[in-house]
Image (spheres, rainbow, N blue to C red):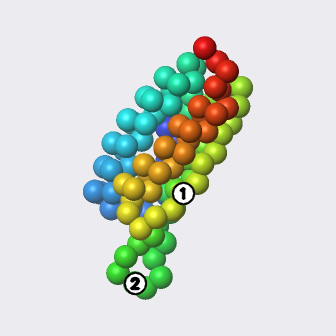
Amino acid sequence: MEEIQFKGVSELSKEEKEIVNKLSTEYYAKIKRKLHNDTSLQLHIKAHSKGGERKKYSAHLRVIAPTKTLESKEDDWDLARTLHKVYKNMETEVNKTFKNRA
């Protein structure tokens, strides 16, 4: 099973792709360590642009563990900030769901 699956990344620029890869790799290690198990991530990124100069990014993250599937969604005007938010929310969700685990 592939560790991290990306959707919508082909529409991003080269610099944006590098940001996504770097942050996803860092947070994948943290989430996998918290789950104590093999994990798969699915990240769907969409850039919204309505004729203005700035893009708004939305990120939908799904963590697929053997026992449970968790989801997190965030959006913001800055790609890195959007990714940090969605991954931090996922870490919180993992902690809440598996808090009774040793």
In the displayed image of the protein, which residue is found farthest to the top?
102
Q: Is residue 26 above or below residue 17?
A: above
Q: Is residue 42 above or below residue 81?
A: above
Q: Is residue 80 above or below residue 102?
A: below
Element type at mark 2? loop
> Quarter-wise, where is residue 41 in the image?
top right
Between the C-alphas of marks 1 and 2, the distance is 21 Å
Q: Residue at x 43, y 36 (%)?
A: 27
Q: Is residue 1 visible?
A: no
In the displayed image of the protein, which residue is found farthest to the right?
67
In the figure, is residue 34 to the left or right of 54?
Answer: right
Q: Residue at x 60, y 43 (%)?
A: 62
Amino acid type, label 2:
Gly
- Residue 52's disc is 2
Q: Which percent across, then down, holds residue 101? A: 64, 18
Element type at mark 1? strand
In the figure, is residue 62 to the left or right of 49?
Answer: right
* Residue pointed to by mark 1: 74
Q: Quadrant of the C terminus?
A: top right
Q: Quadrant of the N terminus?
A: top right
Q: Residue at x 42, y 41 (%)?
A: 24
Q: Which percent across, then down, holds residue 69? A: 68, 36
Nearer to us in this view, 62 or 72: 72
Number of other residues with Cα within 10 Å of mark 2, as a class: few under 14, some 14 to 19, many 20 or more: few
Q: Residue at x 49, y 23 (%)?
A: 33
Q: Which percent across, then down, holds residue 72? A: 60, 48
Q: Is residue 86 visible?
A: yes
Nearer to us in this view, 86 or 95: 95
Q: Which percent across, then down, holds residue 94? A: 60, 33
